[in-house]
Image: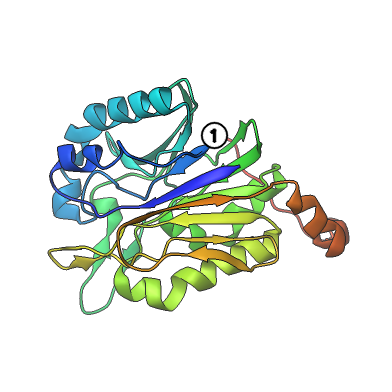
Amino acid sequence: MKICMYQMSVSMDNQQNIAKLKNIPDCDILVLCEMWNCPYHNDALKTAYLRHDESLMALKKLAKSHRIWIVAGSICADKYNRCYILNCDGDIVCSYDKTHLFEFHNRQDYCENEVFVPGNHLQCFDTPWGRCGILLCYDIRFPEVSRILAQNGAQILFCPAAFNEQATKKHWKLFTQTRALENEVFLCGVAPAKYTYKNYTSGGHSILVDGFGNVVVELGEEEAYKVVDIDLNDIEKVRKRMPYWKVRRNDLYELKEIKK
């Protein structure tokens, strides 16, 4: 599985954002960041739904013309922060609406629920290379989500995100390594390149971690593509060596998704 992690700098000019997608390198799956078509700030997000159709159509054309799958970061879909998964025919395989909305209180308060409502389902999807799961940004702070996706067969978790600069420095790498290690899965987290819009500054540092928690690749802050070739069959080797899943005490505890 050749994954192209595209750490792009996001603009208020959506035609500029879309234009950046045209020259991607050869890959099997392209992964974009959370809100790749709009700055991650509530003032901008409140009208981001107007970019939905234009952005989704561009993704469909890209997937079909390049014959690639796309984990399409996220865009504003009505009142949801939504990630679309597209196959190489440009068809929507599934979509995932962010279930945990970011909330933070300090010198400045921030509540993502001023713009979005939370989704109500978790999402795995099958590809020609293996089974995958999807998180969006703040979801990574909730271990239950990653565990359920892994229980449901995901060998790699994709996490489009938009951590701010300070959260990136303090928590981003720690969370990605932890979620990969504790579930023995690959974790691919793609963030925007460093940019500033009003009081928000993104942190960059897109990252791919293997099932032992080792960093396979980590980008800096600048806009960049990175293509990484991984084998999802390696997950079985990891789980054979360290049989967490075999040793778990399902007679004492369990975790399951509540279907709605």
- 140 relative to 244 in the view: left or right: left
For the N terminus, give its image quadrant. Answer: top right
Q: Seen in the image, is 12 located left or right of residue 98?
A: left
Vertical arrangement, residue 18 with respect to residue 206, above or below: above
Tell me where residue 48 appears, x and y as whole percent: 19, 41
- Can you tell which quarter of the image residue 202 is in? bottom left
Residue drawn at (32%, 39%) of the image: 23
Compared across the picture, whether 86 is left or right of 181 comes to left
Percent position of residue 174, x then y: 53, 73
Residue at the spot x=33%, y=63% of the render? 103
Q: Amino acid at mark 1?
A: Lys
Total marks in image: 1
- Mark 1 nearby-residue class (10 Å; few <14, some 14–19, many ≥20): few
Viewer-nearest residue: 75 or 79: 75
Q: Nearer the viewer, residue 51 or 112?
A: 51
Asked if residue 120 shows in the view, the reply is no
At mark 1, the secondary structure is: loop
User: Residue shown at 68%/49% (left/top)?
Assistant: 150
Q: Residue at x 36, y 29 (%)?
A: 62
Depth order, front residue of 257/15: 15
Percent x, y of residue 216: 58, 63
Res. 187 in view:
yes
- Quarter of the image with the C terminus is top right
Query: Which residue bears the numbered disc 1?
Result: 260
**Residue 148: x %, y % from top left:** 65, 49
Question: Which color scheme did the rendering employ for the protein?
Answer: rainbow
